[in-house]
Amino acid sequence: MCPSCGTIHYENPSPAATVIGVQGDQLLLVKRAVEPAVGQWCLPGGFMERGEVPEQTARRELHEETGLEAGALTFLDFCPYPSGPDGVLVLAYHTAELKGQIVPGDDAAEARYFPLADLPPVAFPCHRALIEIFLSRER
């Protein structure tokens, strides 16, 4: 609470959503074109916008970063991530239904599929954890 005006400042994490998009035995990743982690691979995703629910965020970010549309999305799990002053809460969805052609856009320099058994290093610890959760449930 601000001692001079009494305004309450809530220290809440910023909500974000990501998609674990799988085609057969391959996982969709994007190469970041902007900081943080420019030039590194991660899951497609980003911050929730006003008026969105997390699933809408996941769909929008997937499309903005890869040009692909998701079919049915299933909530996978969440991951708190200590970033910025209040942190981020990443909500992850899974789909095996990706439609369209890959066209990197927004803040992605590249987007492509990688074999699940041979993934490149993934930039964000939270994304790595969510991929591991997905893989452990698929085994």
Image (cartoon, helix red, strand yellow):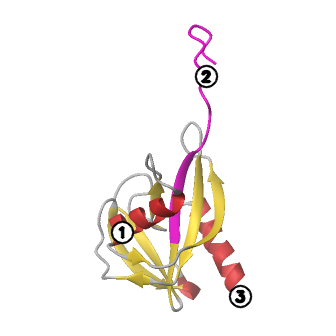
Asked whether residue 58 is in view, the answer is yes
Residue 15 at x, y = what percent?
55, 50
Please, which residue is most extreme toward the top here? 4
Of callouts 1 and 2, which one flags the residue occurring earlier in the amino acid sequence? Answer: 2
Near mark 2 (Cα within 10 A), the count class, few <14, some 14-19 or many ≥20, is few
Q: Residue 3 sits in which quadrant?
A: top right
Residue 84 at x, y = what percent?
54, 41
* Amino acid on which disc 3 is placed: Arg
Residue 25 at x, y = what percent?
54, 90
Where does label 1 land, which residue?
63
Does the magenta run of residues contain 10?
A: yes
* Amino acid on which disc 2 is placed: Ile
Where does label 3 land, which residue?
139
- Disc 1 is placed on an element classified as helix
Magenta stretch: helix, strand or loop mostly:
loop
Near mark 3 (Cα within 10 A), the count class, few <14, some 14-19 or many ≥20, is few
Where does label 2 land, which residue?
8
Disc 3/disc 2 C-alpha distance (Å): 46 Å
Q: Residue 40 sits in which quadrant?
A: bottom left
Judge from the rendering whether residue 41 lies leftward or rightward of residue 82; answer left or right: left
For residue 126, above or below residue 63: above
Read off the magenta span: 1-19
For residue 93, above or below residue 16: below
